[in-house]
Image (cartoon, rainbow, N blue to C red):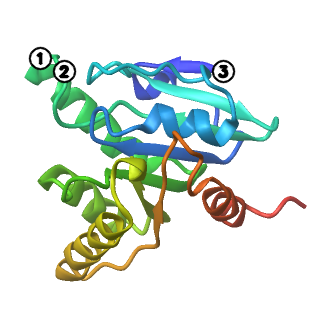
Amino acid sequence: MKSAESMDQLPNEEFPEIAFVGRSNVGKSALLNMLARRNALARISAKPGKTQTFNFYCVNEGVYFVDIPGYGYAKVSKKKRAQWARRIGAYLTGRTTLSLVLHLVDSRHPPTSLDKEIMLLLCENHVQSLLVLTKADKLSGNGITKSIQRVRKDLTAHGMELPIVVTSALGSTGRNELLDRIGNALPAVS
């Protein structure tokens, strides 16, 4: 629908928005494609930092899925990363039509310090969010259980409690649960 490099380029706040946020290369675009059941809706790359704009996708003519640039490692300048961080923070805390943030964390690794900063930012600003553990297809059942326990321990250590959904874009794992949670987060249509 629209790509925006700055806050003043964002579309009018006419539809509720579901934001996909996470580290570079965590699987935001892949998850968005899986939810929409469209292989190439959002462009996927093995190279971190491919998504450099806020990309708005209109779903069912009434909701925007927003693919946000990843934070952390990307082959861009420190200045560019700092700009992204400011824009992401401003968007997550100031967008009135933001209905839900899907905060993606790679299930194979513990949350990074940047992941924890985003968790705290969302919690402190009372932004409705849930934690999405991605790439579950790369772990055994026991590995997934350990990943969930590790994330819950980190959340508890910071006084936070968030719903956790385990996903795999490869096998559509978690798709129905995410769609249910998205549906529940959307404002009631009158």
Residue 17: x and y in percent read 61, 45
Spatial separation of the CA atoms under disc 1 and disc 3: 28 Å
Residue 36 can be seen in this image: yes
Question: Could you tell me which quadrant the C terminus lies in?
Answer: bottom right
Give the residue type at disc 2.
Answer: Lys
Query: In the drawing, what numbered circle is on residue 77?
Result: 1
Pointer 1 local density, CA inside 10 Å: few below 14, some 14–19, many at least 20: few
Residue 15: x and y in percent read 71, 42
Query: In the drawing, what numbered circle is on residue 1?
Result: 3
Residue sitting nearer the eye, 25 or 87: 25
Which residue is painted at 60% across and 38% down in the image? 34
Query: In the drawing, what numbered circle is on residue 80?
Result: 2
Residue 116: x and y in percent read 20, 60
Q: Which quarter of the picture shows residue 86?
A: top left
Question: Could you tell me which quadrant the N terminus lies in?
Answer: top right
Residue 36: x and y in percent read 68, 37
Query: In the drawing, what numbered circle is on residue 65?
Result: none
Which residue is painted at 35% across and 30% down in the image? 69
Q: Which quarter of the picture shows residue 25?
A: top left
Q: Do the numbered discs 2 and 1 sit on residues whose CB atoms are within 8 Å?
A: yes
Residue sitting nearer the eye, 15 or 183: 183
Pointer 2 local density, CA inside 10 Å: few below 14, some 14–19, many at least 20: few
Give the residue type at disc 3.
Answer: Met
Query: Would residue 131 appear left or right of 87 to someone viewing this image?
Result: right
Of the two numbered discs 1 and 3 on the same chain, state the one appearing first in sequence. Answer: 3
Spatial separation of the CA atoms under disc 2 and disc 1: 5 Å
Q: Is residue 75 above or below residue 89?
A: above
